[in-house]
Amino acid sequence: MDRSSMDSHHHPSQPLVAHGERPREGGTDRKITEVAVGVLVKPDGAFLLTSRPEGKVYAGYWEFPGGKFEAGETAVQALGRELEEEIGIRIAGAEPWRTEVVDYPHALVRLHFCKVTRWAGQLQMREGQSYRWQQLPVDVHPVLPGALPVLQWIADERHWLGGTTLEPLDPATGTRR
């Protein structure tokens, strides 16, 4: 997915609008859903992306793993619980990194991104999702709109001057579009 499906005038103080042409569920007075998101990074710099499982909104889109806060949880606590439930690992080193509000058609979410550099256990995709360790530019498609800013943050930190995503392969020609 490219940025054309998002608000092209995104400013950090304003929500990132995903698929702005679609109606918003719940109208203009929607409650923000708090979501913890893990940016798992291996020593070689590769980061983990997982696909959203069938039956969920945006099924098949690639994202950084995580999930909703439960009452009283911090971002790191919520992330620890969600990563154990969804991908079978226990985080051993995580720190809050950045926050981004994303206005999706189905929900208004505040994404609390945490960098995770140490964990225990082997990856187990417990919800039927797929996973890929990626470097820039990522070669999985489509990427969830809320993950696109993270790819840019990673690029900025690494002084990466290229694009953050590769165009998908054209099935007819086997070349990038």
Image: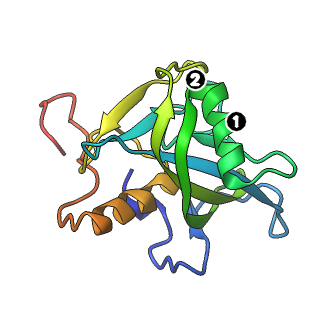
Q: Is residue 176 visible?
A: yes
For residue 29, above or below residue 115: below
List x then y, in percent, for residue 69.
76, 48
List x then y, in percent, for residue 37.
58, 48
Q: Residues within 10 Å of mark 1 (few under 14, many from 20)?
A: many
SS assignment at label 1: helix
List x then y, in percent, for residue 60.
49, 31
Q: Which residue is mark 1?
A: 81
- Give residue 113's quadrant in the image: bottom right
List x then y, in percent, for residue 112.
62, 58
Circles 1 and 2, Cβ within 8 Å, touching? The answer is no
Residue 133: mark in rendering: none
Residue sitting nearer the eye, 77 or 57? 77
Disc 1 residue type? Arg
Left or right, 25 with reference to 148: right
- Give residue 133's quadrant in the image: top left
Disc 2 residue type? Gly
Q: Which residue is rendered at x = 53% and y = 78% of the image?
A: 12
Q: Residues within 10 Å of mark 2 (few under 14, many from 20)?
A: some
Q: Which residue is mark 2?
A: 88
SS assignment at label 2: loop
- Give residue 19's quadrant in the image: bottom right
N-term mark: 1 or 2: 1
Give the distance between the C-alpha atoms of the residues marked 1 and 2, in whole angstroms.
10 Å
Residue sitting nearer the eye, 23 or 139? 139
Classify the position of the C terminus by image quarter.
top left
